[in-house]
Image (tube, helix red, strand yellow):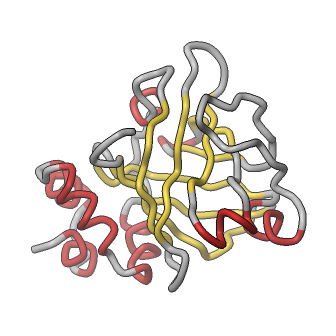
């Protein structure tokens, strides 16, 4: 049985976590990125009430860029990364690492990451960070025609799936955007 098969079968969150945690990092990344985008909404619902995410565990070690591979529900431009940085003191920041047209037109989509309610994490695009670690792209506002449409006034909520994998949903002005994504820690950190 694969990760996709478990989600299709409405497996218990504990079964899904145990399966993913038992995989090598390379196989886990491959299986997570292979899940059909249409199943992300289902996984979001399966994980409701089962999250126990702690930001300090999710973004570790402090002082280094931590990379998560991302797949979203869309049919195109659906593979990218979220990169995080947790300083020794202060707020954790992140951005969306994309290539090609998405990078050119939408920009990096900077956000703050923080612990939320019910063991979930929040990625807050409504405030613009000033911290930009070495090697990160220039900070640009999440406003304007394309960046505003993609990131403007948005907060993502994320729930734990396994030790290195989370499922998220995007909200704008407190209302669901019917947009889901899954993140899994990259097999190799650069």
Residue drawn at the location 42% of the way across and 36% of the way down: 58
Relative depth, front residue between 117 and 43: 43
Residue drawn at the location 46% of the way across and 27% of the way down: 56
- Residue 95, given in percent of the width and then of the height, sits at 62, 47
Q: Is residue 14 left or right of residue 176?
A: left
| Direction top: furthest residue | 89
- Residue 100, given in percent of the width and then of the height, sits at 60, 69
Q: Quadrant of the N terminus?
A: bottom left
Q: Is residue 118 left or right of residue 28?
A: right
Q: Quadrant of the C terminus?
A: top left
- Residue 24, given in percent of the width and then of the height, sits at 14, 50
Q: Quadrant of residue 156?
A: bottom right
Relative depth, front residue between 48 and 36: 36
Residue drawn at the location 58% of the way across and 42% of the way down: 117
Q: Is residue 65 above or below residue 18?
A: above
Relative depth, front residue between 113 and 80: 80
Q: Is residue 61 above or below residue 20?
A: above
Q: Quadrant of residue 155?
A: bottom right
Residue drawn at the location 30% of the way across and 74% of the way down: 34
Count of number-bearing discs: 0
Q: Is residue 137 left or right of residue 126?
A: left
């Amino acid at each position: 049985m694969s990760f996709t098969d478990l989600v299709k079968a409405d497996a218990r969150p504990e079964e899904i976590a145990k399966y993913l945690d038992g995989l090598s990092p390379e196989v886990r990344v491959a299986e997570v990125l292979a899940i059909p985008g249409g199943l992300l909404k289902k996984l979001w619902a399966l994980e409701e009430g089962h999250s126990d995410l702690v930001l300090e565990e999710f973004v570790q070690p402090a002082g280094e860029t931590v990379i998560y591979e991302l797949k979203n529900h869309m049919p195109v431009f659906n593979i990218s990364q979220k990169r995080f940085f947790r300083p020794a003191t202060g707020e954790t920041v992140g951005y969306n690492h994309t290539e090609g047209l998405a990078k050119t037109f939408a920009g990096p989509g900077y956000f703050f990451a923080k612990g939320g309610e019910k063991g979930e994490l929040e990625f807050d695009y409504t405030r613009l960070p000033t911290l930009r670690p070495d090697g990160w792209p220039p900070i640009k506002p999440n406003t304007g025609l394309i960046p505003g449409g993609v990131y403007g006034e948005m907060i993502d909520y994320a729930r734990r799936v396994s030790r290195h994998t989370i499922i998220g949903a995007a909200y704008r002005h407190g209302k669901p955007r019917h947009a889901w994504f899954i993140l899994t820690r990259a097999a190799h950190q650069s």
